[in-house]
Amino acid sequence: MCFSAGVVMAAVKIIAICQSGGKFETGQDGCLSYKGGDAHAIDIDNQMNFNDFKAEVAEMFNINLCAMSIKYFLPGNKKTLITISNDKDLQRMAKFHQDSSTVDIYILLEEALAIEVSNMPASRSSRTTLSEAAEPVNTNENHVASDALLDVAHDTNQPDIDMDIPLEVSPTFALSSNDEKYAKGAQQWQNTITGVGQRFSGVHEFRESLRKYAIAHQFAFKYKKNDSHRVTVKCKAEGCPWRIHASRLSTTQLICIKKMNPTHTCEGAFGTTGHQATRSWVASIIKEKLRDCPNYKPKDIVNDIKQEYGIQLNYFQAWRGKEIAKEQLQGSYKDAYSLLPLFCEKLMEFNPGSLAVYTTKEDSSFDRLFVSFHASLYGFQQGCRPLIFLDSIPLRSKYQGALLAATAADADDGVFPVAFAIVDVESDDSWHWFLLQLKSVLSTSCPITFVADIENGLKNSIPEIFEGSFHAYCLRYLTEQLFRDLKEQYSHEVKRLMIEDLYAAAYASKPEGFQNCLESIKRISTEAYDWIIQSEPQYWTNSLFQGTRYNHMTANFGELFYNWAADADELPITQMVDVIMGKLLELIIARKAASDQWETRLSPSMEEKLKRESQKSHPLQVILSTGSTYEVCGDTPTEVVDIDRWECSCKTWQLTGVPCCHAIAVIVGIGQCVYDYCSRYCTTESYRLTYSERVNPIPIMAVPESKDSQPVVTVTPPFTRRPPGRPATKRYVSQNIVKRELHCSRCKGLGHNKSTCKE
């Protein structure tokens, strides 16, 4: 089934006159004409893009959007249909027909193509008596897109010129003529070759069309001449007279068919094995499906091509075809590394105050890339707590590598990206280099607490580069290391109990609470107890830690980068950075818009914390001790609050930045406002400062050309390493370990303590 649309170019809007139910007919001269069909009209305003137009046509005729394609003729050429697949193609079509009042557009369905080609001058041998043929189009997607082609398209009598430039012969293959189920995929190619006079934009387009034509008509061919300006082909079967010759039209790049014998006397040259299938052909077949389904597997490619075209590929052919198609869709990995110097330069040009720097190895291959945007640096220094989480993420890209991430916590305890780096290998040196770059862009004067792993040299690099800072061990990494080092085997239930006790020890705000939790672990395993004592608890427990980690015990804030990298780590390196840049911009815009609706002085999560502490403060009694120091007693043990130093002996005020119930009882008792004693890092104002700057995208760049005076800096891809074992199908995602539940000493219930017990 075909649909035709005549588009009338108006000053304000375009009227598309669509016809359905018609069919193509081929004249003796090879020209195509569309006959029959019912007419409908569509109004198209100046803002409608290609996708909107395609969707409206599909809805009008109840067509599957994915199964339709849109094509048109160039002026003066009724033999070659040109494909429209995006907005630029639609604009080119309008430009080619700017001197005409109308242009015919044809919507073809892959599922129901039934085109009469009874008078077609091309070959239809006795064995290819299919009752239905496919769309009479040139299916090469790289159709003509220049004014020069439009000028040449009106002249069909250009003499050819021969040049002796050799070109690699491309192998071909054919369908099995005994299996009708293979005809469906190839029917659309039956008229890619229409006869003498048909023109193509170049030899590549002609070869691709010839290959598809041979598949559709189930025969094999071989090249007699094959170079940049002429191609001569004959049927591979011995004695078969089928032959075609095409050469270049003089003064142009167009290739025109000059001679053709359409008669076949053979019954096909070979079977359906895929040893002659080209990788580029496989890529052209699967490219559109790969665009919609990035996880298209090679084994599925093998099955689909066997089912649709009767070609039996092996796994490697399918895999290589997929790699070529990915490169055509995403861009070249090699070109992306070549673009890296210019990319870093433009990133800093369009985002003043940002840093984008890369290093290479001695052989000019890629080593490391560090990126930190001005919006991230400004937001961290103006609105975030002096707390940075360091984490790494393995990449699944062609060249492996890792992404190192530095994140912070905003005023609402949300993840805020500060900087990231893409490195060839995660090592002590790469982390040291990352921290050096981070130090060069941070101008904060107060000490920073880093929540990070113990390994990868961070224990030595952090105090060396950030003098006076604090290294807080990530509790998740500590727990993993604990069970790796223990020699005894423990059941899942015992491990869970030890993890709960370990987390309770880390969150304990007082030394006695920490020691009680360790005694609980000791009763389970003396080996685990000894390990924990040797693990330097002063770096990971609240009761002994000298810095301020605001009750954040793990480096899981890097999970935001994990989610972003999951969508981008298979892209070339510049596109990967571009995706992360776009994600950061979306994050800033969304959170800024959300905070504009807040009417509270604190962020929502901090407001909720303050509300919970206020409710617990009602039964407490305040006793004035000396100066600014107060004793607070109630159902809980007596605590000491220093109102001037913003400290409470329970340490909750210092850990969260929000006054605890004891401090609130004192503040209310002396007639002060509780909000005046909240950390500025918890306020709505700080949150808005964090997201006050924007990230500016950079324009699309071309690969730089070398100049005589200034040679272009060359960056090549890193050495490809294949990791041992089968490739991982799923990423490792850290599991959130459940904290130890509160236990009430009054009612013996779980989930609360004695002070909040309703009994």
Image (spheres, grey):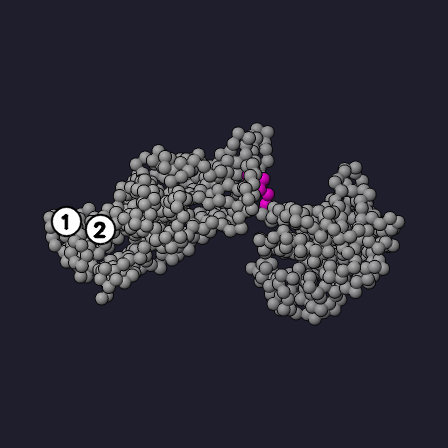
Residue under pointer 2: 650
What kind of element bears circle 2? loop
Give the number of marks. 2
User: In the rendered view, does 25 fall on the left or right side of 410?
Assistant: right
Residue drawn at point x = 80 percent, y = 49 percent: 221
User: In the rendered view, does 461 fall on the left or right side of 699?
Assistant: left
Q: What amino acid is labelled 1 in the image?
A: Thr
Q: Nearer the viewer, residue 178 or 259?
A: 178
Image quadrant in which the C terminus is located? bottom left
Residue drawn at point x = 76 percent, y = 38 percent: 166
Q: Is residue 418 above or below residue 35?
A: above
User: In the rendered view, does 675 fall on the left or right side of 181?
Assistant: left
The crowding category of the residue bearing disc 1, from other C-alpha atoms within 10 Å (few below 14, some 14 to 19, many at least 20), is: some
User: Is residue 335 on the magenta stretch?
Assistant: yes
What segment is highlighted magenta in the picture? Answer: 331-338
Q: What amino acid is labelled 2 in the image?
A: Cys
Residue 103, given in percent of the width and then of the height, sits at 69, 60
